[in-house]
Image: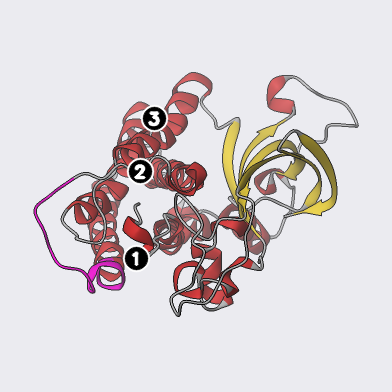
C-alpha cells in the first residue's frame, strides 16, 4: 500500500478487520456440533462458503474502495515502488493480513469437508487473492500505484501458512499484532489518524508485529514451559511522521519537531490463547477469535545498537 507524496495512508489491517468479522462465525460456531468441521464433503456448506466468501470480500473491498479511492482520479494501471517507505512496517502488515486470510480460508474449507491438502491450498490462495484486489485498485488510482513489494509480502504471508500446514500439519509459528497509542499523530493527524478509533490502523509507530512460537512445539517442556507459553520476536518503528522521510512543516506551514526515525526489535513472551484449557464454550470462542493479538509481557528492546528493558510491552 502506497503513499505518494504523503497524500494519504492506508493500512493493510483494514482488511484484517474485515476478515475478523467475516470469519468470526467459524470460531464461534465451532463449539456447536451442527457447525463443526465436516468429516466428508458437504456441498451445501461448500456453496455457503463460496457465496459468503465472495459476498463478504466484495463488501469489504467495496467499502474500503469508497473510503480510500473516492477522492482520487482513475488512471491507467501503473506500478509504484514504495519499498523504502515506512521502514517496511506496512509490508509486515501485509504479510500478517495475508497469513490470516489463508488461515481463515483454510478453516472455512475444512468446515465444508474439503480434504486437508485442498483446504491448505485453497485457503492460501484466498489469503493471497483477498489482498490482490486492492493492489489492482491501487494500480488504477492517481493517489497510489500497484506495489511489487506489497505483492511479495502478500505471497510470503500466505506461503508461511501453507508451508507450515503442509510440513507440520499445524501452525508452530504464528504472526501476531499489538498496538499502543503514541504521540506522533498529533503532528500529522490527517496522515496518522485523528482519533483513537483510526490511529491503531494508521499510526505505524504504535504497531508491533510479532512472530510467536510455542515452546513445546519445538521440544521445550517442563514446568518452565507450560502448554500455553510462547516466545515472541517483534518488530516496530518509531519517529515516523512521513513515508520515506519526515517533513519539516505541517499542512498549515508550521514547523514540526525533528524525530529520529528508527526500527525496533523486541524479545518477549506470549500466550497461545487457543491452548488455554476451559470448559466454557464462550471463552473457547473468544480465545480463538482473539488469538491474533499479542499478550502484554516484559520485553527486551533493541534499537540503534542499544538494548532496553521494558517492564511491560504491548
Residue at 51% over, 53% down: 30
Note whether residue 71 is visible: yes
**Up-down: is 72 above or below 118?**
below
- Is residue 210 within the magenta segment? no
- Nearest to N terminus: mark 1 or mark 2: 1
Q: Residues within 10 Å of mark 3 (few under 14, many from 20)?
A: some
Q: Residue at x 23, y 74 (%)?
A: 71
Q: Secondary structure at mark 3?
A: helix
Q: Which residues are magenta?
A: 65-78
**Which percent across, then down, holds residue 294?**
67, 50
Q: Quadrant of residue 38?
A: top left
Dominant SS type (magenta): loop
CA distance separating discs 1 and 3: 44 Å
For mark 2, what is the residue? Answer: 127
Instruction: Determine if the magenta segment contains residue 70.
Output: yes
Mark 2, secondary structure of its residue = helix
Left or right: 205, with 24 as reference point: right
Asked which secondary structure carries label 1, the reply is loop
Q: Residue at x 30, y 41 (%)?
A: 81
Mark nearer the viewer, 3 or 2: 2
Mark with earlier residue (3, 2): 3
Cα–Cα span, label 3 and label 2: 16 Å
Name the mark nearer the viewer: 1 or 2: 1
Compared to residue 128, the image places residue 50 above or below, namely: below
Applied colour scheme: secondary structure
Nearer to the camera, 32 or 309: 309
Label 2 environment density (alpha carbons within 10 Å; few <14, some 14–19, many ≥20): many
**Residue located beneath label 1 in the image:** 7
Q: Would residue 151 appear left or right of 165 to someone viewing this image? A: left
Q: Residues within 10 Å of mark 1 (few under 14, many from 20)?
A: few
- Residue toward you, 53 or 112: 53
Amino acid at each position: 500500500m502506497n503513499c505518494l507524496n504523503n497524500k494519504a495512508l492506508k493500512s493493510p489491517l483494514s482488511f484484517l478487520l474485515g476478515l475478523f468479522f467475516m470469519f468470526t462465525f467459524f470460531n464461534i460456531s465451532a463449539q456447536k456440533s451442527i457447525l463443526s468441521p465436516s468429516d466428508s464433503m458437504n456441498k451445501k456448506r461448500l456453496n455457503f462458503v463460496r457465496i459468503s466468501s465472495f459476498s463478504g470480500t466484495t463488501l469489504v473491498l467495496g467499502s474500503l474502495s469508497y473510503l480510500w479511492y473516492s477522492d482520487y482520479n482513475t488512471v491507467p494501471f501503473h506500478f509504484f515502488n514504495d519499498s523504502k517507505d515506512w521502514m517496511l512496517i506496512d509490508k509486515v502488515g501485509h504479510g500478517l493480513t495475508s497469513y490470516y486470510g489463508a488461515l481463515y480460508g483454510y478453516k472455512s474449507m475444512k468446515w465444508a469437508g474439503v480434504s486437508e491438502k485442498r483446504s491448505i491450498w485453497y485457503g492460501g490462495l484466498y489469503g493471497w487473492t483477498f489482498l490482490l484486489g486492492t493492489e489492482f485498485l491501487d494500480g488504477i488510482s492517481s493517489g497510489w500505484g500497484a506495489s511489487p513489494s506489497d505483492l511479495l509480502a502478500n505471497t510470503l504471508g500466505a506461503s508461511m501458512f501453507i508451508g507450515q500446514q503442509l510440513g507440520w500439519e499445524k501452525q508452530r509459528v504464528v504472526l501476531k499484532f499489538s498496538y499502543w497509542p503514541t504521540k506522533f499523530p498529533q503532528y500529522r493527524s490527517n496522515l496518522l489518524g485523528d482519533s483513537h478509533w483510526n490511529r491503531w490502523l494508521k499510526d505505524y509507530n504504535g504497531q508491533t508485529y510479532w512472530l510467536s512460537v510455542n515452546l513445546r512445539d519445538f521440544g521445550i517442556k517442563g514446568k518452565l514451559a507450560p502448554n500455553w507459553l510462547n516466545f515472541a520476536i517483534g518488530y516496530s518503528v518509531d519517529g515516523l511522521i512521513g513515508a520515506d522521510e519526515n517533513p519539516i512543516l505541517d499542512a498549515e506551514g508550521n514547523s514540526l519537531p525533528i524525530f529520529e526515525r528508527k526500527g525496533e526489535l523486541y524479545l518477549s513472551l506470549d500466550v497461545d490463547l487457543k491452548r488455554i484449557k476451559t470448559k466454557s464454550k464462550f471463552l473457547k470462542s473468544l480465545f480463538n477469535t482473539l488469538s491474533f493479538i499479542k499478550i502484554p509481557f516484559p520485553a527486551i528492546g533493541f534499537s540503534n545498537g542499544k538494548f532496553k528493558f521494558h517492564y511491560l510491552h504491548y
